[in-house]
Image: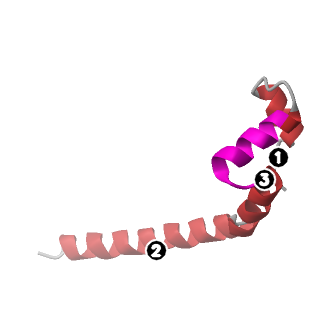
Amino acid sequence: MYDELSLSQIADLLNYSSLAYLSTQFKSITGMAPSQFKLLWDKQRKSLNNLAVQYLLTADEFLAQKEQLNGTHCKS
C-alpha cells in the first residue's frame, strides 16, 4: 500500500558506504535496529483508508459547525 524505500535504497540515497554501517549508526542513535523501528512504526501508522474516513468526518463536522455559526450570526 505504501511506496516505501528499502533500507538498501535509503543507504544508497544517503551515500552510506554500506547497509551495515547505516544499520549500526541508526541503532547507536535510536537505540533500536531499523527492523525494530519499522515494526513499531507499522503498528502506529494508520492506513490511508482510515485517514480518508477520518478526514471526511472532520470535514463534515467542520461544515456543520460553520453552518451553525452562520445561522447564529445571521440572526440579529
- On whether residue 70 falls in the magenta region, the answer is no
Q: At which x and y percent is residue 37?
A: 74, 57
- The residue carrying pointer 1 sits among few (fewer than 14), some (14 to 19) or many (20 or more) residues within 10 Å by Cα, namely few
Q: Which residue is disc 1 drawn over?
A: 3
Specify the farthest residue to the left. 76
Q: Earlier in the sequence, mark 3 or mark 1?
A: 1
Residue type marked 2: Glu
Q: At which x and y percent is residue 69?
A: 28, 72
Residue type marked 1: Asp
The CA span between labels 2 and 1 is: 31 Å
Find numbered disc 3 in the image and state the secondary structure of the residue it sits on.
Answer: loop
- Label number found at residue 50: none
Question: Is the residue 72 above or below the residue 1 in the image?
Answer: below
**Predominant SS of the magenta segment:** helix
The CA span between labels 2 and 3 is: 41 Å
Question: Is the residue 71 above or below the residue 1 in the image?
Answer: below
Residue 71 versus residue 49: which sits nearer the camera? Answer: 49
In this rendering, position of residue 29 left or right of residue 42: left
Q: Residue at x 35, y 69 (%)?
A: 66
Residue numbers of the magenta segment = 21-33
CB under 8 Å between discs 2 and 1? no
Q: At which x and y percent is residue 42?
A: 76, 63
Is residue 48 visible in the rendered structure shown here? Answer: no
- On whether residue 27 falls in the magenta region, the answer is yes
Q: Which residue is disc 3 drawn over?
A: 33
Q: Which residue is disc 2 drawn over?
A: 61
Residue type marked 3: Ala
Q: Earlier in the sequence, mark 2 or mark 1?
A: 1
Question: Is the residue 64 above or below the residue 55 in the image?
Answer: below
Mark 2 against mark 1, which lies toward the viewer? Answer: 1
